[in-house]
């Protein structure tokens, strides 16, 4: 007698866009951004692209480089994290696609998770307390500038999901 197959939770991936990502933070991209020339017209400044929130309770901004190794598909989501004391921004350096999995701030609810895929030039800024999966590079090793909160005290909560979810990239 064979055992019945266990149904998997499937999380469909959608394109990353400002409007659909807004409940979780900011999409950082040039399209549609306020911009103007500076430096005698030799440079175009794309202005105020995200709301960074890192200074509460004595925090300070940290600027980091994360080098993410690609994840093989299909990929299971089994862990989520959040930063309760500040936002966390990711800016890709080389136009590479990556996936973003998020859930609203507050008590974690797996049924409210959403998944997005960046076009490679879009960054994200997770708002304070928003649940997200650690960085998911898709095609090859990828470097990101990451701006988050430094200072005293822990700023990362992790949870293991009771039942893993599988990303559906179709």
Image (spheres, rainbow, N blue to C red):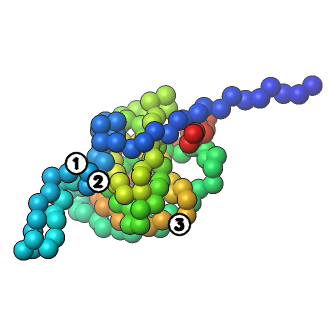
Q: Is residue 107 left or right of residue 68?
A: left
Check disc 2: other Cα within 10 Å, few if <14, some if 14-19, many if 20+: some
Q: Nearer the viewer, mark 1 or mark 3?
A: 1
Identity of the residue furthest to the front in this view = 41
Instruction: Provide residue 87's location: percent of width, then percent of height.
Output: 29, 51
Picture quarter with the N terminus: top right
Picture quarter with the C terminus: top right
Residue sitting at x 59%, y 56% = 71
Residue, disc 3 = 141
> Which badge, 1 or 3, is on the more N-terminal residue?
1
Q: Is residue 118 left or right of residue 150?
A: right
Q: Is residue 18 above or below residue 46?
A: above
Q: Is residue 79 left or right of residue 33?
A: right
Q: Are marks 2 and 1 in contact (CB under 8 Å)?
A: yes
Residue, disc 2 = 29
Label 2 vs label 1: CA separation? 8 Å
- Element assignment for label 2: loop
Instruction: Provide residue 48's location: percent of width, then percent of height.
Output: 17, 55
Q: Is residue 93 above or below residue 126?
A: below
- The numbered disc on residue 101 is none
Check disc 1: other Cα within 10 Å, few if <14, some if 14-19, many if 20+: few
- The numbered disc on residue 32 is 1
């Amino acid at each position: 007698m064979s055992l019945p197959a266990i149904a998997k939770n499937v999380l469909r991936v959608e394109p990353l866009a400002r409007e659909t990502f807004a409940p979780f933070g900011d999409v950082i991209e040039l399209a549609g951004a306020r911009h103007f020339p500076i430096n005698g017209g030799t440079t175009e400044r794309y202005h105020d692209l995200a709301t960074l929130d890192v200074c509460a309770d004595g925090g300070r901004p940290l600027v980091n480089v994360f080098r993410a190794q690609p994840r093989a598909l299909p990929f299971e989501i089994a862990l989520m994290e959040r930063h309760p004391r500040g936002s966390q921004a990711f800016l890709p350096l080389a136009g590479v696609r990556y996936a973003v999995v998020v859930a609203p701030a507050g008590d974690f609810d797996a049924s409210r998770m959403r998944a997005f895929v960046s076009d490679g030039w879009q960054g994200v800024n997770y708002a304070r307390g928003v649940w997200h999966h650690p960085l998911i590079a898709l095609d090859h090793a990828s470097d990101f500038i990451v701006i988050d909160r430094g200072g005293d005290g822990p700023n990362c909560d992790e949870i293991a999901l009771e039942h893993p979810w599988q990303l559906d990239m179709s």
